[in-house]
Image (tube, rainbow, N blue to C red):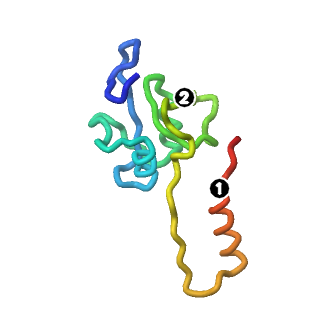
Amino acid sequence: MQGNDTKWPDSSQINVYIYLPGSEINIIISDSLGFSGGYTSGAKIAFQPENVLNNVGRDPAAFGFIPVEMVDESVKMVEIEGNEKSGFTREIVTIYGSELTVTQNSWLACLTRGIQTD
């Protein structure tokens, strides 16, 4: 398959589920995959990853992007050729007006460590 395909090899219509244009998750996916031109005009909007999971799980001609920890038996995970797994990240900046509390420090440490999926 190529990025401009509209039909699967069996000739069924490809149904794409995307997040709201301009949303943080959509920006991360678009930037990571190099989708500078946007998505197809027929893309269906999903407000949360749960919506993508539910819709793609019910529609064998659909695809979308969800966090790997959400993949279950209702969907099939596929690799994107040429994509680096580390590409799905977004930098954050934290600014505090005073010294961090123990809770704030723990929260920030949790964010910067990331989650190991290996």
- The residue sitting at 37% across, 17% down in the picture is 12
| Kind of element beneath mark 1 | loop
Q: Residue at x 36, y 29 (%)?
A: 3
- Say which quadrant the N terminus sits in: top left
Nearest to N terminus: mark 2 or mark 1: 2
Q: Which x, y percent locates residue 24?
A: 44, 56
Q: Residue furthest top?
A: 10
- Label annotation for residue 78: 2
Residue assigned mark 1:
114
Q: Is residue 8 above or below residue 17?
A: above
- Kind of element beneath mark 2: loop
Check disc 1: other Cα within 10 Å, few if <14, some if 14-19, many if 20+. few
Image location of residue 47, percent across then percent down: 43, 48
Residue type (three-letter) at the residue carrying disc 2 = Val
Residue type beneath disc 1: Gly
Disc 2 to disc 1, how far (Cα)? 22 Å
Question: Against 38, is 24 above or below?
Answer: below
Question: The C terminus appears in which quarter of the rendering?
Answer: top right
Q: Is residue 118 above or below residue 104?
A: above
Residue 52 percent location from the top left of the image = 48, 39
- Which residue does the image show at 55% across and 86% down from the upper left? 97
Q: Which disc, if any, is residue 7? A: none
- Residue 75 versus residue 37: which sits nearer the camera? 37
The residue lying at 64 percent from left, 69 percent from top is: 108
